[in-house]
Image (cartoon, grey):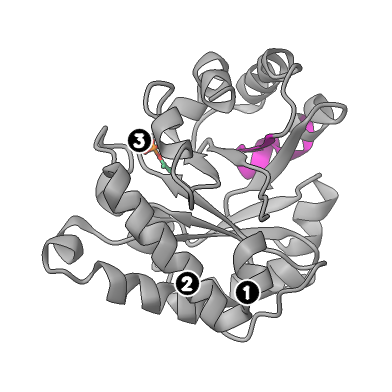
Amino acid sequence: MEYRIPLIAGNWKMYKTCNEAVDAASRLVKLVSDIDGVDIMIAPPFTSLAVVSEVIRDSRIDLGAQNIFWEKEGAFTGEISPPMLISSGCQYVIIGHSERRQYFGETDETVNKRIKAASTSGLIPILCVGETETQRDDKKTFSVLDKQVKKGLESLILDEHHSIVIAYEPVWAIGTGKTATQDQVQEVHSFLRDMLENNFGNMIAKATRILYGGSVKPDNVSELMALPDVDGALVGGASLQPESFSKIIHF
Ligand code: PEP
């Protein structure tokens, strides 16, 4: 029987100074000390990674970054490399978030470079994919996702030492309070799992966690987690308050 440990991941976006991040992480550590059988990740801004890493060191919480550059070092002002993230304590990195695609010119090609650099350096990439409202209305959801996943994961090697997480985040559900229906979510997640099977084989498809993201809250998380192909959640707004994020983690 297949078993994937659920992952509840918090994307703090551009919120929290160092002190605020340390405070929130410390409160979260206490709130989730009873948790077993759920992986937890928080992704603070780059500036707080190192200090938050100290706070969560002996807890069940892992650390993630919100972006990565593909070169190890060099004259790339403002960029952050894989070894820098690892030395700051990261295990995960979010790649291709719709806000990066929408506001910062991220493309499937640059997403692919980031995914490969993260994976070969030992980080677990969380590839974000999702359609806009217009694309859904135009019945393009599956062709958009097909392209984002195929190009995003092109020539990536996955095995027992190199895993990825996929986050399905319909753009129209991010930060809007609109959540996709259970049918919409399960339909897309099963499509994504089939894609993984076709591209990487049955074992990888069964082992890979597919998260849902888009206005996940304490009161809708359990119905989403009950779906067979939902293996966790990528949470934005509701991850900023440790109390509400903890309720989601305790789904
Ligand atoms: C996100 O930023 O990945 C996200 C899903 O945000 P929210 O939960 O606020 O919709």
Of tags 1 and 3, the one toward the viewer is 1
- Which residue is more in the foreground, 136 or 95? 136
Where's residue 204, x and y in %?
Answer: 66, 70
Highlighted range, magenta: 38-51
Q: Residue furthest front?
A: 1
- Mark 3 crowd level (few <14, some 14–19, many ≥20, 10 Å Cα): many
With 192 as the anchor, is 197 left or right in this view?
A: right
- Which residue is more in the foreground, 91 or 149? 149
- Mark 2 crowd level (few <14, some 14–19, many ≥20, 10 Å Cα): some
Q: Vertically, is 31 above or below 59?
A: above
With 50 as the anchor, is 110 left or right in this view?
A: left
Which residue is disc 1 drawn over?
A: 202
Q: CA distance from mark 2 to mark 1?
A: 9 Å
Q: Which mark is residue 194?
A: 2
Q: Does label 2 or label 3 sit earlier along the sequence?
A: 2
Q: Secondary structure at mark 1?
A: helix
Ligand 1 is found in the corner quadrant, namely: top left
